[in-house]
Amino acid sequence: MTILTQTCTPFEGQKPGTSGLRKKTRIYMQPGYVECFVQSIFNAIGGVAGKALVIGGDGRYFNAEAIQTILRMASANGAALAIVGQSGLLSTPAASNLIRQRGADGGLILSASHNPGGIDEDFGLKYNISNGGPAPEAITDAIYEQTKTLSSFKTLDTADIDLDQIGTVSLGEMAVEIVDPVDDYAALMEDLFDFAALRALFASGFTMKFDAMHAVTGPYAKTILEDTLGAPAGTVLNGVPSVDFGKGHPDPNPIWAKPLVDLVMSDDGPDFAAASDGDGDRNMILGKGVYVTPSDSLAVLAANAHLAPGYERGIAGVARSMPTSGACDRVAEALAVECFETPTGWKFFGNLLDAGRVTLCGEESAGTGSDHVREKDGLWAVLLWLNILAVRKMSVKEILQDHWQTYGRNYYSRHDYEAVDAAAANGLIAELTVKLESLAGQTFGACTVTMADTFSYHDPVDGSVSHNQGLRINFEGGGRAVLRLSGTGTEGATLRVYLERYEAPEGDLNIETQAALKDIAEATALISGLTERTGRTAPDVMT
Ligand code: VG1
Ligand code: CO
């Protein structure tokens, strides 16, 4: 087989967003599109000669084809080893773990995460560095610069290899090692959690449903929950990964995982329920009759992590993305550990985790994780919850009530306005940005603004600064609104409005969430001119 150098013309818009490059699948399927982006990645990281790369994805439409292309290119560019999940499957946290366990130089993860899959839906690709985490901004910026001027890429003229067969084969000079996608990850989970206690929990009749949403976590959840921990067969729902996620939207929130929510809200529902997203890094936690917001979940995990063997020494600190509620801040304060506020996207947690400044991280978008890998990790969060339930012998609802009675409650909701006209959304943000400075002291409806600004993050570890990471508006009494545009969407713009209000332990802890946030939502609509600008009177999704 020969190494080919093919000339190419740059594609516009190959700019990585919050988590890699996400586009409509048909855009990705254009001849040369994957090649140009992958060669740009390789060029931006100083080439891959002699390097080991982990490669895998969430199994969506075009996953296997893109992996074949990447393998040919990695070989042609001189990589020594590619470690690939069997059938091209690797959950995002499992890929992160493999990079770390195997001491690989980096990895390519193919996923558009919670976005639907299929030829008319979404595809995505991102590069992770040797710590197992998403490439930081300096690298994603360098990749984008490469995409603008790229004139050629290298590949091999060779047939596809068999991705289904575990073992090592040669592709040109490069070795391709096909590994079981679950093994190493399952071993890591067994290290962190008290599997004996979890087995006893299931043996005692504790009931659970895990909705894999036809996505990548099916095999992981079946192996760990059913085969290892003894949960009855059928605990895992929708457990066979499919290329279009059963035509669903693999986003574990009360909208897209509604059947699961309905089940736990019913009288004969299970004690505990959870779901994960397309690539297995997100989680939704539910208990009988209760939905745990991701922000609350992070806070509860921070307060209770020491109950699991992997965290029995306590946590070093906690980090949350800026739009995530301040619930975990109160836990950090009580534990006297550091608490950090970072921009949206897991890549900003990497430095803090590497430096040992934090043990747990989380985002309001159903992402929680720890220093065990450098990605958020859906099943990990589920197992930590189970471990806490096994030790505390309380229901999810009781744990949540107890948490609020101790720390108070941060009422929280995110309102998404999807596929908004991009010009209208950009206009809204631009105009509001200009207005921010003058807002303090003004009253809108029932709320008075105390502070408003654009969030910039100063990374305390490497000193880098990231500007324009969302607009913050604080209100008297501790309420807050955050507005930002999504960096993962593929159609028009998605405007995210994050609303929060704190209620002290002695206050009313059981108000319906949207009712608790009504005044703040109204004030935010007035300030931003949301309805006039977007033509929307209600959000598409509320989480
Ligand atoms: C969204 C979430 C963000 C998350 C990102 C990737 O980004 O808000 O918290 O890190 O998705 O998650 P954005 O820019 O659309 O708001 V995943 O599970 O899609 O990799
Ligand atoms: Co995801």
Image: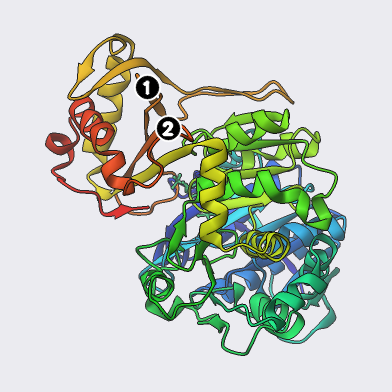
Residue 19 seen from this side? no
Q: Find residue 89 and report its image quarter.
A: bottom right
Residue holding disc 2: 502
Q: If you read the primary sequence from the N terminus, does the residue marked by circle 2 or circle 1 appear first?
A: 1
Q: How far across and down, in percent of the image, does residue 333 sit?
A: 65, 28
Q: Is residue 247 left or right of residue 334?
A: left
Residue holding disc 1: 477
Q: Nearer the viewer, residue 88 or 240?
A: 240
Q: Nearer the viewer, residue 35 or 57?
A: 57
Say which mark, if any, is on residue 116.
none
Q: How far across and down, in percent of the image, does residue 298 sit?
A: 59, 47
Q: Nearer the viewer, residue 249 or 334?
A: 334
| Relative to 216, residue 505 above or below | above
Q: Amino acid at mark 1?
A: Gly
Q: Find residue 222 and report its image quarter.
A: bottom right
Q: Is residue 177 left or right of residue 528?
A: right
> Is the residue marked by circle 1 packed among few (<14), some (14-19), or many (20+) residues within 10 Å?
few
Residue for point 24% across, 38% down: 518
**In what element is the residue under mark 2?**
strand
Residue for point 43% across, 57% down: 23
Q: Amino acid at mark 2?
A: Tyr
> Is the residue marked by circle 2 packed among few (<14), some (14-19), or many (20+) residues within 10 Å?
many
| Relative to 402, residue 228 above or below | below
| Quadrant the N terminus occupies | bottom right
Q: Find residue 443 and report its image quarter.
A: top left
Q: How far across and down, in percent of the image, does residue 46 sit?
A: 76, 42
**In what element is the residue under mark 1?**
loop
User: Circles 2 and 1: CB distance less than 8 Å?
Assistant: yes
Q: Nearer the viewer, residue 385 or 339?
A: 385
Residue for point 37% across, 54% down: 490
